[in-house]
Amino acid sequence: MNAPIIWLHEEALRTSHPVFRAAPTEAKAIYVWDDAYFRRVNYSLKRLIFIYETLCALPVDIIFGNTPDILRELAPTTLYIPATNNPLILEIITELKTITSVQIYEDEAFVVPKKSADFIRFFQYWNKAEKTAFLKNGGLDA
């Protein structure tokens, strides 16, 4: 292929992700439907259906196969990838860095709490975050 590619994974299934603004316009978005990966993460049928239906609503090509093999075969000039903490996806990214240029793009913050704090429980975080969570830019404009 020898063109830039946006590799979407299940943690960034939307066109509003910053990776779409950063990648060149000729970059094609792909999602690799990798059964071996899905078995490793033990996704339920409902989760797989959700992922598939979400992909069907996006301008993305779905390719079936082993993720590293498919991306190696496509040989992109640059691979644009949304950031993730998923250790299995990070393994694949580390492997891909040895064969092509990889650029990782962080997502925008869901919410930016006014005060910093160490939250031990999600409920403590949510009590602080819920006031601005659904505002544009996480309440930064307020």
Image (spheres, rainbow, N blue to C red):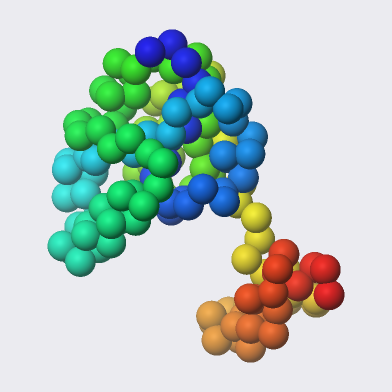
- Residue pictured at 82% horizontal, 68% vertical: 141
Describe residue 44's horizontal placement relative to residue 115 as left or right: left
- Residue pictured at 28% horizontal, 57% vertical: 53
- Residue pictured at 30% horizontal, 16% vertical: 73
Describe residue 103's horizontal placement relative to residue 118 as left or right: left
The answer to whether any part of residue 89 appears in the image is yes
- Residue pictured at 28% horizontal, 24% vertical: 70
| Towards the viewer: 91 or 34 | 34
From what the image shows, is residue 32 above or below residue 24?
Answer: below
From what the image shows, is residue 10 above or below residue 110?
Answer: above
| Towards the viewer: 102 or 5 | 5
Q: Quadrant of residue 34?
A: top left
Q: Position of residue 101 (x, y in %)?
A: 53, 19
Counting every numbered tag in the picture gives: 0
Q: Quadrant of residue 43?
A: bottom left
Q: Quadrant of the N terminus?
A: top left
| Towards the viewer: 3 or 114 | 3
The answer to whether any part of residue 99 appears in the image is no
Q: Position of residue 5 (x, y in %)?
A: 46, 26
Residue found at the far top of this picture: 2
From what the image shows, is residue 18 above or below residue 74?
Answer: below
Q: Quadrant of residue 120?
A: bottom right
Q: Position of residue 142 (x, y in %)?
A: 83, 75
Q: Position of residue 98 (x, y in %)?
A: 45, 17
From what the image shows, is residue 58 above or below residue 31?
Answer: below
| Towards the viewer: 63 or 79 | 63
